[in-house]
Image: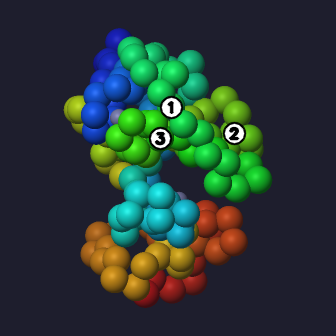
Amino acid sequence: MADAHVSGGCLCGTVRFSVTLPTLFCGHCHCSMCRRSHGAAFVTWFAVPRNQVEWVSGQSQLRRYASSDHGTRSFCGRCGSSLFCESSKHPDQIDIVLANMEGPIDRPPQVHVYFDDRASWAIAEDSLPRLGGSTGLEKMRTHP
Ligand SMILES: [Zn+2]
Ligand SMILES: [Zn+2]
C-alpha cells in the first residue's frame, strides 16, 4: 500500500490526475450546492492532502467557481465534469469526486453529511452515520 496510486479524470479525458493513497475521508454530501452543481441527489467525495495529487494533463482547462465565501469548486472547461472542491478552512487538503476515479480508493464512504439538507427523493438505506445542522457535520438527533 505504500505506493498506491489511483488515476482519475473528467468525462472527456482532458483533465487527468493521479492520487496517492491513503485518503483522509470519504463521505456522501447532501448539500444543495453539491446537488445542483452535479445534477445528482448527492455527491460522494473523498479528501487527500494536496501534495498527494499529481497532475497528468489538462490543469489549464480547469475552471474554478467560488461557490461560497470559503469554497471553490472546479470543473473541466470542455466537458463540465465536476472534479474538485477546495476550502480556505482546510487549505492543505483537497476534496475529490469519487465517481471520477478509475479504481477503488482505500476506504468505502463512511458518513452522510448535510443530511438534513437532502433532496426529498434521495433514498439512503444504509446504516452510515447521518450528520447535518448548520455545519453539515453535527450529529442529528433523529435518523429519519
Ligand atoms: Zn473534460
Ligand atoms: Zn456538498
Crowding at dot 2, Cα within 10 Å, few <14 / some 14-19 / many 20+, comes out as few
Rendered position, 90 above or below 116: above
Taking the view exactly as shown, the residue that stands out farthest to the front is 78
Q: Are marks 1 and 3 in contact (CB under 8 Å)?
A: yes
Q: Taking the image as drawn, is residue 121 in sight?
A: yes
Rendered position, 59 above or below 122: above
Look at the numbered disc 2 and give the secondary structure of its residue. loop
Residue where numbered disc 1 is placed: 62
Which amino acid lies under the numbered mark 1 shown in the image of this protein? Leu
Gap between marks 2 and 1 measured at Cα: 20 Å
Residue at point 70%, 56% (across, down):
68
Residue at point 38%, 63% (across, down):
39
Give the image location of residue 43, x and y in percent.
41, 57
Report the quarter where the N terminus lies. top left
Give the image location of residue 113, x and y in percent.
51, 64
Ligand 1 closer than 8 Å to label 1 CB? no
Give the image location of residue 38, x and y in percent.
41, 57
Residue where numbered disc 3 is placed: 75
Look at the numbered disc 1 and give the secondary structure of its residue. strand
- The image quadrant that residue 104 belongs to is top left
Q: Are marks 2 and 1 in contact (CB under 8 Å)?
A: no
Direction from residue 72 to residue 22 in the image, left or right: left
Q: Nearer the viewer, residue 75 or 135?
A: 75
Q: Nearer the viewer, residue 9 or 64?
A: 64
Tell which circle, 3 or 2, labels the residue nearer the N-terminal end: 3
Q: Nearer the viewer, residue 60 or 104?
A: 60
Which is closer to the viewer, label 3 or label 2? 3
Residue where numbered disc 2 is placed: 90
Which amino acid lies under the numbered mark 3 shown in the image of this protein? Phe
